[in-house]
Image (tube, rainbow, N blue to C red):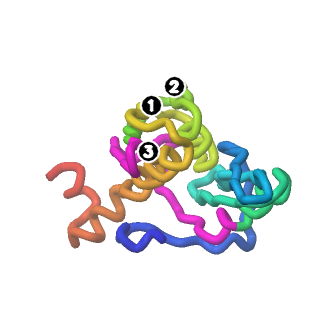
Amino acid sequence: MYQKYKSAELVKPSGLDLKDRLVGVQRVTKVTKGGRAFGFSAIVVVGDEAGVVGHGLGKSKDVASAIAKAVEDAKKNLVRIPIVKGTLPHEQKGKFGGARVNIIPAAPGTGVIAGGAVRTVLEAVGVHDVLSKSQGSSNPHNVVKATFDALLQLRDARTVARDRGISLEKVFKG
């Protein structure tokens, strides 16, 4: 799922204290010759609030099992996100479908300035100070995936130094 991101580090769910957050539940309808068949789809974000996060989608005839399936799906694709002093290492843009998300690091004490699905993802990651702007589609599925796109492109200074084969000081001082 995250093959296009070279810095994406997949994490196993065992031993982590994961908290699940519900992003949204939709009632979906399948029209058949016998009438309408109602079901539910739920999108959930799970995270340990210390840099590990994943998202999942669950579908079922009732809400509770749709959420349970979504949580199981989310635990299957957990990734580690770099966090520096409660915020992000740098500004980043993400996009998925019609959704565009811009996340910007903020000074300590700012809080999470984000709305809807972006806030849910950033809180699950464990970011305490961040600014964000969501543009285009407000569809929660695409907004969550756009936020993950932005988060998975983040790289901390150590990763940059290792990739370039230079010292950490040279990354900052040029």
| Mark found first going from the N terminus, 3 or 1 | 3
On screen, residue 80 versus residue 74, left or right, reads left
Residue of label 1: 131
In front of the other: 108 or 132: 132
Return the x and y of residue 62 as percentages of the image width and height: 84, 54
CB-based contact (under 8 Å), mark 2 and mark 1: yes
Could you tell me residue 136's position as x and y percent?
38, 35
> Furthest-front residue in view?
33
**Corner quadrant of residue 79:** bottom right
Q: Looking at the picture, which amino acid does disc 1 mark?
A: Leu
Q: Where residue 69 sits in the image (x, y, percent)?
A: 75, 64
Q: Residues within 10 Å of mark 2 (few under 14, many from 20)?
A: few
How far apart are labels 3 and 2 at the CA level? 13 Å
Residue 67 appears in view: no
From the viewer's perspective, tell me whether residue 168 is left or right of residue 32.
Answer: left
What range is drawn magenta here? Answer: 73-99
Q: Kindly identify which numbered label has been placed on residue 110.
A: 2
Q: Quadrant of residue 100?
A: top left
| In contact (CB < 8 Å): disc 3 and disc 2 | no
Residue 88 shows which numbered tag? 3
Judge whether 82 appears above or below 5 on screen: above
Q: Quick one: label 3 or label 2, which is nearer the N terminus?
A: 3
**Residue 174 on image: x %, y %:** 14, 52
Q: What number of labels is visible?
A: 3
Residue extending farthest to the top is 110
CA distance for labels 2 and 1:
8 Å
Dot 3 alpha-carbon crowd within 10 angstroms: few under 14, some 14 to 19, many 20 or more: many
Residue 12 magenta: no
The answer to whether residue 130 is left or right of residue 50 is left
Q: Nearer the viewer, mark 2 or mark 1?
A: 1
